[in-house]
């Protein structure tokens, strides 16, 4: 049974945000560093940024790239992870590749990918795709391995073909674990989106960050970081609502493991 949301459910996150803002304001006043403006100065820039058409277009470009890379990763990574979990041959083929790619920070691949695809959307989308794919594959694999063999034997006895068993038995049973990987991938999509745009500076939130830093507009830099954090919070909140609706019978997942970006 899914626990009901109480009126105080949003209180801890709100208190955490207020505490962070208070610490930020205090640190700025104590240390007096030019690169650390007080929180109130950064927050004062938020209305101007959100009212600026160019800034909104940059944010929309970033969200579009993130959505494309994230969506393509899910289309590939979930089936691959499920197949690896149910087939030793497929797992033996993909495991060495994943072991090589996983420890490499995806942003470190950006210069090489830029040589192949240029500095446009394709290179940034590919980096996001790589960052999202690995945790989704891993958790889909773990979810598929945890499916009880008796269920699959019963389905086979009823005449279900392997693909039917994968879609109708393995996928629903593995879905809670798959969602853990997707939630982790959502965080990594946001991280790799920003880092790729800071390396290949054309458009996007990373471009705004770097240009503001070059011009010593530190209050704008921190305001943009607040916007990125708010975007991540909203996406995670929406995802949790979707997860709770699709797998209401599963235990809620409150923690995520962020892998190498």
Image (tube, grey):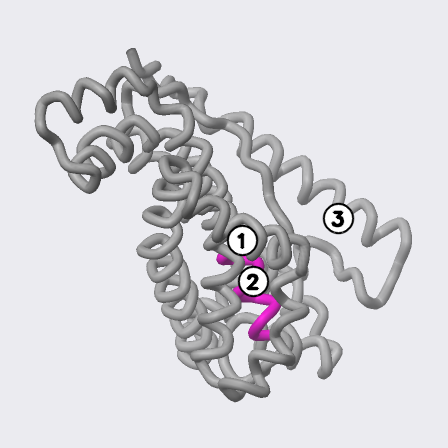
* Mark 3: secondary structure: helix
- Of residues 125 and 142, the one nearer the viewer is 142
Quadrant location of the C terminus in the rendered image: bottom right
Residue lying farthest to the top in this orientation = 1
Rendered position, 92 above or below 175: below
Instruction: Report if the CB atoms under discs 3 and 1 are less than 8 Å apart.
Output: no
Separation of marks 3 and 2 at Cα, in angstroms: 28 Å
Mark 3 highlights which residue? 25
| Residue 193 is a magenta residue | yes
* Disc 3 packing (10 Å; few <14; some 14–19; many ≥20): some
* Mark 2: secondary structure: helix
Quick check: 165 left or right of 200? Answer: left
Mark 2 highlights which residue? 192
Can you give x and y, in whole percent of width and height, for residue 222 in the image?
A: 66, 62
Mark 1 highlights which residue? 188
**Segment colored magenta:** 189-197
Quarter occupied by residue 196: bottom right
| Residue 178 is a magenta residue | no
Quarter occupied by residue 156: top left
Separation of marks 1 and 2 at Cα, in angstroms: 6 Å
- Of residues 164 and 260, the one nearer the viewer is 164
Instruction: Report if the CB atoms under discs 3 and 2 are less than 8 Å apart.
Output: no
- Count of numbered badges drawn on the protein: 3
Instruction: Report if the CB atoms under discs 1 and 2 are less than 8 Å apart.
Output: yes
Residue lying farthest to the right in this orientation = 31
In this rendering, does residue 129 appear at all? yes
Q: Earlier in the sequence, mark 3 or mark 1?
A: 3
Separation of marks 3 and 1 at Cα, in angstroms: 28 Å
């Amino acid at each position: 049974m899914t626990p009901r949301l109480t009126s105080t459910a949003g209180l801890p996150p709100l208190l955490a945000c207020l505490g962070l803002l208070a610490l930020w304001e205090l640190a700025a006043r104590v240390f007096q560093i030019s690169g650390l403006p007080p929180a109130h100065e950064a927050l004062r820039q938020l209305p101007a940024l959100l009212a600026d058409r160019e800034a909104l277009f940059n944010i929309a470009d970033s969200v579009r790239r993130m959505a494309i890379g994230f969506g393509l990763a899910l289309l590939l990574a979930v089936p691959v992870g499920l197949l690896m979990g149910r087939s030793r041959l497929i797992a033996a083929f993909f495991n060495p590749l994943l072991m090589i790619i996983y420890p490499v920070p995806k942003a470190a691949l950006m210069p090489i990918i830029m040589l192949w695809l240029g500095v446009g959307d394709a290179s940034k989308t590919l980096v996001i795709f790589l960052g999202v794919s690995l945790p989704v594959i891993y958790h889909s694999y773990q979810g598929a391995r945890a499916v009880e063999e008796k269920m699959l034997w019963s389905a086979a006895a009823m005449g279900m073909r392997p693909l039917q068993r994968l879609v109708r038995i393995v996928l629903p049973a593995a879905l809670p674990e798959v969602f853990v990987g997707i939630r982790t991938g959502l965080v990594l999509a946001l991280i790799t989106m920003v880092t790729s745009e800071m390396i290949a500076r054309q458009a996007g939130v990373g471009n705004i960050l770097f240009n503001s830093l070059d011009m010593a507009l530190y209050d704008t830099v921190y305001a943009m970081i607040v916007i990125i954090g708010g975007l991540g919070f909203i996406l995670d909140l929406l995802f949790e609502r979707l997860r709770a609706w699709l797998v209401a019978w599963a235990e809620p997942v409150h923690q995520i493991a962020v892998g190498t970006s």
